[in-house]
Image (tube, coloured by chain):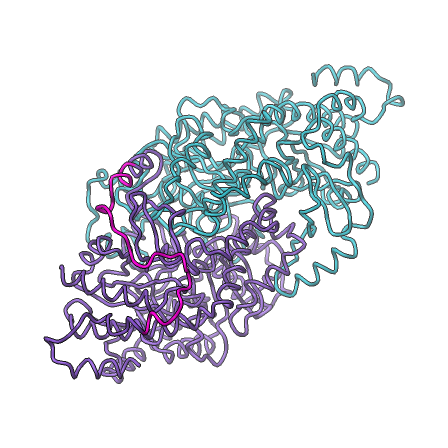
Chain colours: A cyan, B purple
Amino acid sequence: MASIARSSLRMRPAMMRAPVARAFATTGARRAAYFPDEPAAPTVVSAIPGPKNKAAVAELDKVFDVRSVNMLTDYSKSHGNYIADLDGNQLLDVYAQIASIPVGYNNPHLKEVATSPEMVSALINRPALGNFPSADWANILETGLLKVAPKGLNQVFTAMAGSDANETAYKAAFMYYRQRQRGGPQTEFTEEELQSTMRNQGPGSPQLSIMSFKSAFHGRLFGSLSTTRSKPIHKLDIPAFDWPQATFPTLKYPLAEHAQENAQEEKRCLEEVERLIQEFHNPVAAVVVEPIQSEGGDNHASPAFFRGLREITQRHGVLFIVDEVQTGVGATGKFWAHDHWNLPTPPDMVTFSKKAQAAGYYYGNPALRPNKPYRQFNTWMGDPARALIFRGIIEEIERGDLIKNTASTGDYLYAGLQRLAERYPEHLQNLRGQGQGTFIAWDSPRRDDIIAKSKAEGINIGGSGQNAIRLRPMLVFQKHHADLLLERVEKIIQKL
Amino acid sequence: MASIARSSLRMRPAMMRAPVARAFATTGARRAAYFPDEPAAPTVVSAIPGPKNKAAVAELDKVFDVRSVNMLTDYSKSHGNYIADLDGNQLLDVYAQIASIPVGYNNPHLKEVATSPEMVSALINRPALGNFPSADWANILETGLLKVAPKGLNQVFTAMAGSDANETAYKAAFMYYRQRQRGGPQTEFTEEELQSTMRNQGPGSPQLSIMSFKSAFHGRLFGSLSTTRSKPIHKLDIPAFDWPQATFPTLKYPLAEHAQENAQEEKRCLEEVERLIQEFHNPVAAVVVEPIQSEGGDNHASPAFFRGLREITQRHGVLFIVDEVQTGVGATGKFWAHDHWNLPTPPDMVTFSKKAQAAGYYYGNPALRPNKPYRQFNTWMGDPARALIFRGIIEEIERGDLIKNTASTGDYLYAGLQRLAERYPEHLQNLRGQGQGTFIAWDSPRRDDIIAKSKAEGINIGGSGQNAIRLRPMLVFQKHHADLLLERVEKIIQKL
């Protein structure tokens, strides 16, 4: 479809060009709206932030740091893909709480889940999950988050959010690594290990490492932040572990025109990964990677690159952790982004959060359960209330065939953006995410201006890294929303 | 009251002694039960775990590590202070989900909160709190968790659980420390800092430290685990920061008989703290301490010790973080355990979780907000659903005057345990927690046997450290529960 659209567009003389989105308006309208009560279009009735929002932010500022506040939100007036503020503005939301709302604001099915007796109990009788799980915990897992477990991974450790999902996965990797080194799960700790770990020294607290990639984002607690390499502002003044970073490929776009160059770049990066595994002074227990570097610039790599990572890690006895915190749960047009890779063997662990509304890591190898209880443990180990919400999300995804919707809407949106990029090449550079659902991004030298002006045009949109606009619509984002987005993006660019 | 009870007991000849609890049975009955539908006594109808529990655990084991499972729980049949399993057993619960259930299972007021429209919205429209807080977030904070903020601390950063509450507090401390070193919030980062932090190296990622105490527990993620010194099993194989640990006082009991010795011990420990601050190779940005070391053995220290810590840290420009994750929210007979200390100036930060069901850190000094936005930030920054539950808990505490209840029930329970300790000195040693509400513990050489046998006697009870039994009843634990507990503890001991 994209190629037809492109060729037909190319044949039209420039002066006759209608706004790009229009071409698809009727196509878009053919499909019924997933949210019948959703606004038909954004409403902008005030400057944003408007007077009520400003007053409310000033009030909140007294007790809570508001310098990162984007918009105080009236969730009671937010519906489906539309987010509302206090001044009566309703914006098409393609940022979706930093990519973490999957099935729309005030989704009716989630409302049912939220008022179910199970939910009430989960909220008011919060268990210490490792000690006193509820009788139905196995069932909640099996009918919920394990139902969508990545292929080959049939177990889960639940956590609270992306950072601790990653950190508990790292802990599992370190314990597994040392256990193997020690001679297997039956080998007891030495007295020296028992003593030294209480002083935070080796061998009990070993100088091992997790390798991540430049521009990666894996969270902001001390272990996860040591693998995060997105921006200095995320890391400054916080002590970090001496862990290695490899170069993530910088691909050139359009991909089709730079195939050989990009393959070379990925090869170079894989060689660096292997070299670091062999040479870095703190031995590498695991490599962690995002399928798409989602905070550090929306950087993509090919399936071949990730297969290469899997191969190298396996060959060197290093675990391979895929951080699907932002890419998981459908946004790339498959449930997990790594489903696009056609891996010969699954990742050792896959971490999740955000659109799952719950968090944790999946694994398959039973040896990733540490050799003794209470080694991987904490009081809550997640939140069953959020696990119930995830189950509701999964049900809603199935009911609405929302992954398929996201794949096809994504293709449609990508084609439209491609035409915009041809028309405004200075403002849409390195368009990327083709075939990756709605997980689409592009670079713009005036990125910050575009974001700043988007609210006045009825769009809530976010950035990634230094120059990228990242699209993170919900899974209920449909073609008519794509039309609207394309139309508004074009307007914003025209007004720059 | 305790002293009268003790003296009257002492005068009775040994052979006439009735079970210790009986003496108070009528007193206990005078007060109306807080939960009218609560069982009058434990019911034990099977071995624990019984057949249904065993089968359910085997099922759960397929997908979830169950080696730490204490008891699969039927929360629908758990009420007030009583926890139910799948086999029809109902136990008096003085462990309370590792000290994290404050107002009883299936508390009716929390049920109302859980089904409120606000809760539904918080569950299904989960905000990225730093970017898109809900319009009523300021109000939820002000009528909820800030209403009970420790004296002098009027702001909050919300988190998910105890570990990240502590770690975000540590991050605030490091940023504050470096900011001051750098010359204040207006001083920009140097190019060297910006570059080096991306490599996890100084000066951008500085070699600073957080000082904690031997036997402390502050969580299990990488930064918090580096301050945790409870048991090797919590720490083994996990890389740790090279941070200092000071000795926590080991007090001798009864306190009244060892006043001078204990004061000496505390003085010695304070001197060590000061020496480490002055000499440790990685400069100390903050000292973190639990009011009672709640995982590492229920170790207490005097208010004078904590005032000493406050004085030393202040004098050396080191922040003083009080970790009230386990002690906070009423269990010690005051809302915050550090309310017992009569500090001349408040702690710099107080962290909370568990009984709050929400988490975060309180602070007062505006300079603890980092100098730029997005330095202390993450996607969710807590969970408004859990903040609403905390507000409900606070309302329930006020309605039932539950802190006062805990203080007086605690005194009553302590007096009973004191008599038990006189009768069974080999099984109740170093009884501690007098005047600390129900936050009571004692050591026993046969601690593990006592815990193992307690379920058969209808009691769910936990340990702390190597030898301690820790009592962590809920705030709705009343004198008649105390009578029952005393009676059953005596039975367990008699059957050892």
Residue B47 falls within the magenta-colored stretch: yes
**Depth order, front residue of B246/B132:** B132
Picture coordinates of residue B179, whole percent (x, y):
56, 65
At 69% from the left and 63% from the top, the residue drawn is A59
Q: Is residue B251 left or right of residue B222?
A: left
The reply to whether residue A162 is in sight is no
Picture coordinates of residue A101, whole percent (x, y):
60, 39
The reply to whether residue A76 is in sight is yes
Q: Taking B35 as reference, is A47 above or below it? A: above
Quarter of image, res B306: bottom left
Total number of numbered discs in the rendering? 0
Q: Taking B116 as reference, is A39 above or below it? A: above
The quarter of the picture where the N terminus of chain B appears is bottom left
Task: Name the main secondary structure of what is drawn in magenta.
Answer: loop
**Depth order, front residue of A339/A181:** A339
Picture coordinates of residue B475, whole percent (x, y):
41, 65
The quarter of the picture where the C terminus of chain B appears is bottom left
Q: Which residues are magenta?
A: B27-55
Q: Is residue B331 left or right of residue A3?
A: left
Picture coordinates of residue A353, whole percent (x, y):
51, 41
Quarter of image, res B72: top left
**Extreme residue toward the right, this view:** A15
**Extreme residue toward the left, this view:** B15
Residue B436 falls within the magenta-colored stretch: no
